[in-house]
Image (cartoon, helix red, strand yellow):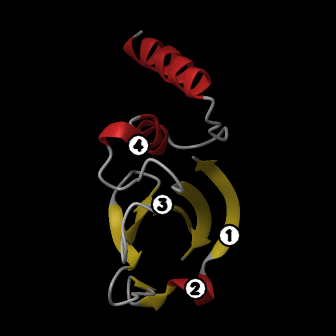
Amino acid sequence: MKKIISSVILLLMVFVNCKKIEIDTPDCITDLIANTEHNVFMCETGASVDEYLFQGNLVYVIEPGNCGDDMLAPVFDSNCKMIGALGGFAGNILINDVRFDKYAVFQRKIWKN
């Protein structure tokens, strides 16, 4: 019952904010998106969430948006475990010691603001 109520509230928040979240997105990623105003990973504008296939698993890259220079783009697995971060001041391209830009395959855009 608690999950149903949470889902209904989440859907209402999505429709009220006019922000589209793709179906078949893990709940933890959906929750992360729904709470953007309290989310340290996302700016108010220009943020997005993309899904990639990487090392045989679906992963989610949180592009922070345009509220700061040299921000990191955290990468989460489908259980919302942060497995690394891309970009930043150093321009990191490695996740699990593997070049993300070379081996990750874009699947879809989950959300953008």
Q: Which residue is more in the foreground, 80 or 42? A: 42
Note whether 25 is above or below 86 in the view shown: above
Marks 3 and 1, the one that precedes in the sequence: 3
* Image marks 1 and 4: residues in contact by CB distance under 8 Å: no
Label 3 CA crowd tier, 10 Å (few <14, some 14–19, many 20+): many
Label 4 CA crowd tier, 10 Å (few <14, some 14–19, many 20+): some
How many angstroms separate mark 1 from mark 4 (CA)? 20 Å
Query: For the image shown, how many numbered marks are present on the structure?
Result: 4
Query: Looking at the rendered structure, which numbered label has been put on residue 101?
Result: 2
Residue underneath mark 1: 106
Q: Secondary structure at mark 2?
A: helix
How many angstroms separate mark 2 from mark 4 (CA)? 24 Å
Note whether 112 is above or below 73 in the view shown: above
> Mark 4 belongs to which amino acid?
Leu
Q: Which residue is more in the foreground, 2 or 75? A: 75
Residue occupying the point 40% across, 53% down? 42
Q: Is residue 41 left or right of residue 21?
A: left
How many angstroms separate mark 3 from mark 1 (CA)? 18 Å
> Mark 1 belongs to which amino acid?
Phe
Residue occupying the point 51% across, 55% down? 47
How many angstroms separate mark 3 from mark 4 (CA)? 15 Å
Q: Is residue 11 left or right of residue 2?
A: right
Q: Residue furthest right?
A: 107
Residue underneath mark 3: 65
Marks 1 and 4, the one that precedes in the sequence: 4
Label 3 vs label 1, nearer the camera: 3
Residue 23: image x %, image y %?
67, 38
> Mark 3 belongs to which amino acid?
Gly
Q: Is residue 42 left or right of residue 52?
A: left
Residue underneath mark 4: 32
Marks 3 and 4, the one that precedes in the sequence: 4
